[in-house]
Structures are given as C-alpha cells and as structure tokens.
Amino acid sequence: MHEMTVIARDAATARSLLGIAPSGMATRVVLLGEQDADDVGGLPADRVVVAPGLTGHDPAALGPSLAPLLAAGLIVLDSGQPARDLAGWLCASLDLPLVWAVERLGRAPDGAIEAERPVLDGGHRLVQRLPAGPAVVLARPEPGPAPAGRPVVERSAAVPGPSALTVRPLDGGAAERARGPAGARTIVSVGRGVGGPDAVARYRRLAELTGAALGASRAAVDGGWLPFAHQVGQTGATVAPDLYVAFGISGAVQHTAGMRASGRVVAVNTDPDAPIARLADLVIAADANEVADALLRRLEREG
Ligand SMILES: Cc1cc2nc3c(=O)[nH]c(=O)nc-3n(C[C@H](O)[C@H](O)[C@H](O)COP(=O)(O)OP(=O)(O)OC[C@H]3O[C@@H](n4cnc5c(N)ncnc54)[C@H](O)[C@@H]3O)c2cc1C
C-alpha cells in the first residue's frame, strides 16, 4: 500500500491527520468545502484536492462524489461524528475494513502497515497489523508540530448528490437539554470522574437552576453519557465562558485546548493535583457528586 488519502473539512485537521502517516507513504488530502489558499499551500502532503462544492453532512450525498477523488490505499479521517458517518458509508459502499481510535501508523519490518491505539486506560498500546489493501482509518493523532510542505494543489468541481437528511428543530425543553455549551456565559461540565451516565441528571438540573449550559469531556461523550454537541475541547466546542465548573475532569491538554480562555475555572476533583488544577482559580478536592448534590440542596432550598 503506497498512498494515503486524508479527508478533512479544514487544513488544520488535515495537518494533524497527516502527522500519523507512516514513513515513505505518498500522501493526498481531499478538503471538503472552500478553503483559505494560504492554509492549503503549506500542507505537508504530496497532493491536495480542494472540493469547495462538497459540503454538508449527509454521507450518502457526499460519498459517491467523493469516492473518485480518493487514492487506492488508506483513507484517514478524524474521529468526530461527521467523519464517523462518512467512514460508515465508505466502508459499506466500497467494502473496506475500518480501524478506529488510531494514534499512529507505522511499518512492520516486512513493510506491512501497523495501526497503534491506546488501550487499558491509555497505559498500553494495541498494535494492529492492517490487511494488505485499502482500509478506512479513524484517527486521533497526538497533537504535535507538523512540518510545512509544498503540495500540488488542484480543485475539484465535485458536488454532492441529493440529500435525504432534513434538520428538525426540537421544541422548548428538549432543545434546551440538547443544546451544547458553545457561546454560554456559565458552563457546568462533566467528566469521567462523575462516575457514569446515571450521574448526569444532577448536573443537568444544576445547569438548569443556574442558567448554565452543560459541557462534557470526551470521556463522557465517548461513553454515551451526553451527545457530541456537549463535548468541549480540541475535537469538540471551543468555549470562553465567564465561569467554567469542571466536575470530575482531569484537564487533559485536548480538553483544556477548548476551555482555557474561560474567565474563572472551578475544578471539583478528588485529586487536587489533577492537571486541571494548574489552570483552576479554585480547586474543590472532593467527590463531584457530593458537591453537586450539596449545591442542588442549597439552590432548591433558596428557590
Ligand atoms: C486527538 C485527540 C483529541 C481529543 N479531543 C478531546 C476533546 O475535544 N475533549 C476532551 O475532553 N478530550 C479530548 N481528548 C481526550 C483527552 O485526551 C482525555 O482522554 C479526556 O479529556 C479525559 O476525560 P476526563 O477528564 O473526563 O477523564 P479522565 O482523564 O479519566 O479524568 C477523570 C478525572 O476525574 C477525577 N475523579 C475520579 N473520581 C472522582 C470523583 N468521585 N469526584 C471528582 N473527581 C473524580 C480523577 O481524579 C480524574 O482527574 C482527545 C484525545 C485525543 C488523542
């Protein structure tokens, strides 16, 4: 397998995905939607195809127009929801295998491609030998510097086919519950430390009573505790509220990338030395749910 195609909606995402390319592999980028020429020109790829007409999120509308732009090799996307939807279409329609959560691609001594991903709470790496042939890779590259390049840039006139998707607005309370934290002045945010999906209701109530929006770490979103719209961080929303209260969130760099512009940060964490403490104005070293319940009792008593 000699070529890898990165599919991304912006040059910054493409740049980080290119960082996982194994040595000696030709690289192509397909950028969906209109792009800034300066960003595109410096991508460290051999070839960049800008497809300004390929916008929208319906994989069945995008996929057939996108497929002819891909090289016969690895197809690499990020791990966000639209990319996952598109990967599903590509795998099913082109009969390709899928590997996910890949942080690095390397080569075995015999030249085969190996995908690495974290397992067992990140303390170990699973190394998966890929079949010899095309495959779709959902990547979560480690952030890091990427070299500048000088790719051959071309434009594609491809446009999506008709879409079968419509967006239906939710009513009142349902819309409020589903809304993410982008643009909010106060955010109550939950992480793995709150324990599980059953714990989330108290934070939703806390957000309702204080007029805050509900945020989440990726661990909480990946666990299915809250929809992706609530995720804060590198691959979620970037927020800058006056107050950000982080319950049971460690403060991984990918999380703080999305909330470090907050005015005041309060961290509720059983570990007072968790990384979030470094940017918190106040650290409450206690069980998150006990603190949330105490706040709820107080707020409900005060009406
Ligand atoms: C490419 C890439 C992109 C990423 N993008 C994002 C992103 O956009 N957003 C994001 O959040 N992450 C992102 N991540 C994941 C990130 O690296 C972390 O894995 C994630 O943020 C951890 O979530 P967490 O803090 O909820 O969980 P953990 O890191 O497991 O932390 C849980 C915390 O809860 C505390 N705790 C445990 N029990 C309790 C208790 N009873 N009460 C209070 N505290 C308790 C612990 O001390 C710990 O600090 C990304 C990773 C990669 C590789």
Image (cartoon, rainbow, N blue to C red):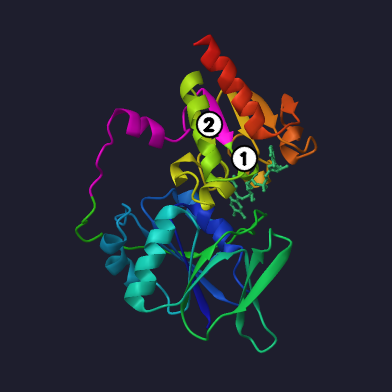
Whole-percent x, y for residue 179 in the image: 40, 34
Tell me, for residue 161, which label it has, or none: none
194 sits left or right of 48 in the view: right
Earlier-in-chain disc, 2 versus 1? 1
The single residue placed furthest to the right in the displayed view is 273
111 sits left or right of 5 in the view: right
Q: Amino acid at mark 1?
A: Val
Q: Residue at x 24, y 52 (%)?
A: 165
The single residue placed furthest to the bottom in the displayed view is 110
Q: Amino acid at mark 2?
A: Arg
Q: Residue at x 60, y 21 (%)?
A: 295
Q: Is residue 157 visible?
A: no
Ligand 1 within 8 Å, label 1 CB: yes
**Residue range corresponding to the magenta coloring:** 166-189
Q: Which residue is mark 1?
A: 194
Crowd tier of the residue under label 1, counting other residues whose Cα lies within 10 Å: few below 14, some 14–19, many 20 or above: many
Q: Is residue 279 above or below residue 76?
A: above
Q: Residue at x 63, y 33 (%)?
A: 289
Q: Which residue is mark 2?
A: 202
Q: Are marks 2 and 1 in contact (CB under 8 Å)?
A: no
Q: Is residue 271 visible?
A: yes
